[in-house]
Amino acid sequence: MHIEENKSLKEYNTFGIESAARKFVSVKTVSELQEVLRKFRNEPKFILGGGSNMLLKNNIDSLVIHIALMGVEVISEDRDHVYITAMGGENWHEFVLYCVESNYGGIENLSLIPGNVGTAPIQNIGAYGVELKDVFERCTAVRIKDGTECTFNKSDCKFGYRDSVFKTEKKGEFIITSVTFKLTKRNHLKHTSYGAIDDILKERGIEAPSIKDISEAVIAIRQSKLPDPKELGNSGSFFKNPVISNDAFREFRVHFPDAPFYDVSPTEFKIPAGWLIEQAGFKGKRFGDAGVHKNQALVLVNYGNATGADIWKLALKIQKEVKEKFGIYIEPEVNII
């Protein structure tokens, strides 16, 4: 293993924030990961995946372990389904494209979500009516304190909206090394009514879309709204869409009858955070090198030299003004480091 000191993390986070790791190591196998965990058992550690779901406010005064575990393998299949395992360091979007090209259905709506496979279950990533839990079979993970390997099935993970056991009771205890998915080979369940997918398909004259058509529609929508992190630093959606109670929703609708919403359950409703932020007047606004994207108010951006503290200051200002205007608290989706 090669340990680097005072390693710049600018290229390892999609915000493009300048930050440094006191120590840094990139691991390419599970055994190498276990060796690092054993050798540095008593040192504080920071686990780094694709760097797409975090905001670095400070330097990291610990050992940064970069997960670079690669590989995709079909474990088993039958007439209708395929069980496919991807290692934690695989790029999520590239994995989605591989499955779409192979006609494996179930994750096409999750195209172009930034990050790696290993962090996808932690967040229970979701988009356009689909969540990771819908296709999740199991994952393997290594316990940070002793390097032992464990397997988690779907019920073990306690998936919720942008949530899992890895963000709650087991937060900071495990590193996900691989994820196994159950995908369809035929009779795909297609989700086209959420968002603008159906509109894109109609514009393209597609009446019976394939999963590739759906993936390409999702990519087109996301590219029209979300900036490429390689061109403009960002972490995708910065805030979660808030879910409010029935009583709070009725009160909200009295004052904002035209606001968009989605049913979550008979007693809960989801309000688009992007709409709240836009109505609060932040869409397209810039504060130094920190700003809110012109096409999607849910995305905070780094115009070049913003610090993590600059981005966070803006996020807090948005939270405060949305709460004052709508009485709704919007929670960050990204991890604040």
Image (cartoon, grey):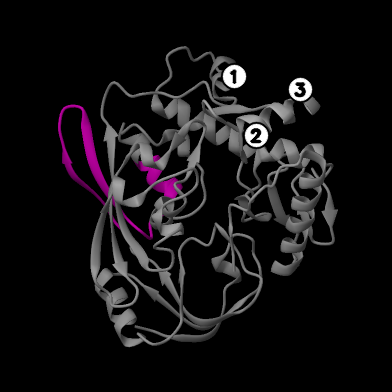
Q: Nearer the viewer, residue 238 or 187?
A: 238
Residues at discs 1 and 2 in contact (Cβ within 8 Å): no
Residue topped by disc 2 = 271
Q: Helix or strand or loop: what does disc 1 sit on? A: helix
Label 1 to label 2: alpha-carbon separation: 21 Å
Residue topped by disc 1 = 199
Tell me: 146 left or right of 169.
Answer: left
Residue type, numbered disc 2: Ile
Label 3 to label 2: alpha-carbon separation: 12 Å
Residue type, numbered disc 3: Pro
Residue 267 is a magenta residue = no
Residue type, numbered disc 1: Asp
Foreground: disc 1 or disc 2:
2
Please tell me which of labels 1 and 2 falls first in the chain: 1
Q: How many marks?
A: 3
Instruction: Please say whether residue 131 is visible from this viewpoint.
Output: yes
> Could you say which disc has been placed on residue 257 in the image?
3
Picture coordinates of residue 72, whole percent (x, y): 28, 51
Residues at discs 3 and 2 in contact (Cβ within 8 Å): no
Instruction: Please say whether residue 259 is visible from this viewpoint.
Output: no
Tell me: 234 left or right of 140.
Answer: right
Q: Residue at x 24, y 74 (%)?
A: 31
